[in-house]
């Protein structure tokens, strides 16, 4: 009997030894060893460690050295053809606020100014019609610092808008709004302190839709009207910084009656002014793109025909 017990005890001890051996071997094969990550560890990364998508490089809207982009729903400007960018502190939608919104892929023509020494953008803000105001955001140090000013408040939603500066101090803004059919309200504003403060010029004598406008110097400015089926140039001129507006006279040759009907913005050339008069939206004379050149020798009060100008000569 004693021998049987000894034999059984031997088998039990052997079984424990063998079981312990296999258990340790299995654990070694299953558990990862230090400095030897298993497949799960190798393929698992924390959210912060995952590679983030990189934003697309900003692309300028044109090949100009000084230009802008509206990528990522924000306005950025460059002074070196896109090598460096400066963000303008304004919401993109504010730049298109108003009755006319443009295509929102490019800024509305004439609603901004981009030069080496000054950049400026005219826009509207306000939560309701009575609270709408026209503002200007501008910089004279290439976007290092920005200033804002109020051009006019309140003002109805804008249709036509234009801003420009002739020098460091004098600038103008021309805006229109409150359109009803072929009528609207339009007004020119001027600044003599670089855009910090603005004063309204006298009200325009007409409520026709404005087509063009601008100042050629600090005292002489023009407002050109007629966008829907114009039949002749309709231009008002000021020679006293907008205190008064007088209707300009165009001496139109008979053959060009109802041909050249919409005056653009005059420019100074030597001792006289020159303006191009186009054919309006429905012109068909010689393809509709030929313009008439008119000259004024009395600072814009009267205009005399000079020559036909081909499209490639006006670029």
Image: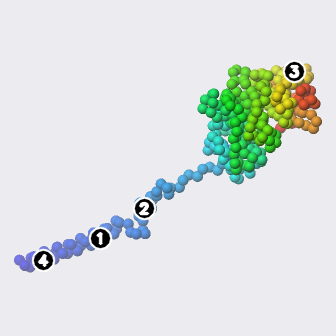
* Tag 2 residue: 41
Between discs 3 and 2, the one toward the N terminus: 2
Q: Are marks 4 and 2 in contact (CB under 8 Å)?
A: no
Between discs 4 and 1, the one toward the N terminus: 4
Q: Are marks 1 and 3 in contact (CB under 8 Å)?
A: no
Between discs 1 and 2, the one toward the N terminus: 1
Say which residue appears at 29% left-offset and 70% top-offset. Answer: 24
* Tag 4 residue: 7
- Res 132 → quadrant: top right
Which residue is nearer to you in this view: 52 or 221? 221
Say which residue appears at 72% left-offset and 28% top-offset. Answer: 176
**Left or right of 299 on screen, residue 157:** left
Secondary structure state at the residue bearing disc 3: loop
Q: CA distance from mark 1 to mark 2?
A: 23 Å
Between discs 4 and 2, the one toward the N terminus: 4
Between discs 4 and 3, the one toward the N terminus: 4
Label 4 vs label 3, nearer the camera: 3
Image x and y of residue 20, in percent:
25, 71
**Left or right of 218 on screen, residue 160:** left
Label 4 vs label 2, nearer the camera: 2
- Above-or-below relation of 127 to 73: above
Q: CA distance from mark 4 to mark 2?
A: 49 Å
> Tag count in the figure?
4
Image x and y of residue 47, in percent:
47, 54
Image x and y of residue 244, in percent:
83, 26
Q: Which mark is residue 24?
A: 1
* Tag 3 residue: 257
> Badge 4, how many Cα within 10 Å: few under 14, some, many 20+?
few
């Amino acid at each position: 009997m004693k021998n049987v017990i000894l034999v059984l005890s031997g088998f039990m001890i052997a079984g424990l030894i063998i079981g312990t051996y296999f258990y340790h071997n299995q654990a070694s094969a299953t558990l990862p060893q230090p400095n030897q990550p298993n497949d799960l560890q190798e393929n698992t990364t924390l959210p912060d460690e995952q590679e983030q998508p990189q934003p697309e490089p900003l692309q300028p809207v044109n090949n100009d050295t000084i230009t802008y982009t509206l990528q990522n729903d924000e306005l950025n400007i460059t002074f070196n053809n896109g090598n460096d960018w400066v963000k303008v502190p304004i919401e993109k939608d504010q730049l298109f606020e108003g009755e006319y919104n443009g295509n929102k892929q490019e800024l509305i023509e004439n609603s901004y100014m981009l030069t080496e020494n000054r950049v400026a953008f005219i826009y509207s803000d306000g939560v309701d019609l009575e609270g709408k105001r026209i503002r200007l955001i501008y910089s004279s140090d290439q976007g290092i610092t920005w200033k804002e000013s109020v051009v006019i408040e309140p003002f109805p939603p804008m249709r036509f808008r234009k801003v420009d500066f002739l020098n460091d101090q004098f600038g103008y803004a021309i805006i229109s709004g409150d359109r009803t059919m072929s009528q609207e309200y339009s007004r020119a504003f001027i600044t003599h302190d670089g855009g910090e403060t603005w004063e309204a010029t006298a009200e325009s004598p007409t409520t026709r839709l404005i087509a063009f406008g601008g100042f050629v110097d600090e005292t002489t400015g023009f407002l050109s009207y007629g966008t829907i089926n114009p039949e002749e140039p309709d231009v008002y001129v000021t020679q006293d910084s907008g205190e008064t507006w007088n209707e300009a006279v165009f001496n139109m040759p008979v053959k060009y009656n109802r041909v050249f009907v919409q005056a653009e913005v005059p420019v100074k050339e030597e001792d006289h002014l020159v303006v191009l008069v186009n054919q309006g939206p429905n012109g068909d004379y010689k393809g509709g793109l030929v313009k008439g050149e008119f000259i004024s020798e009395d600072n814009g009060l009267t205009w005399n025909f000079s020559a036909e100008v081909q499209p490639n000569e006006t670029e």
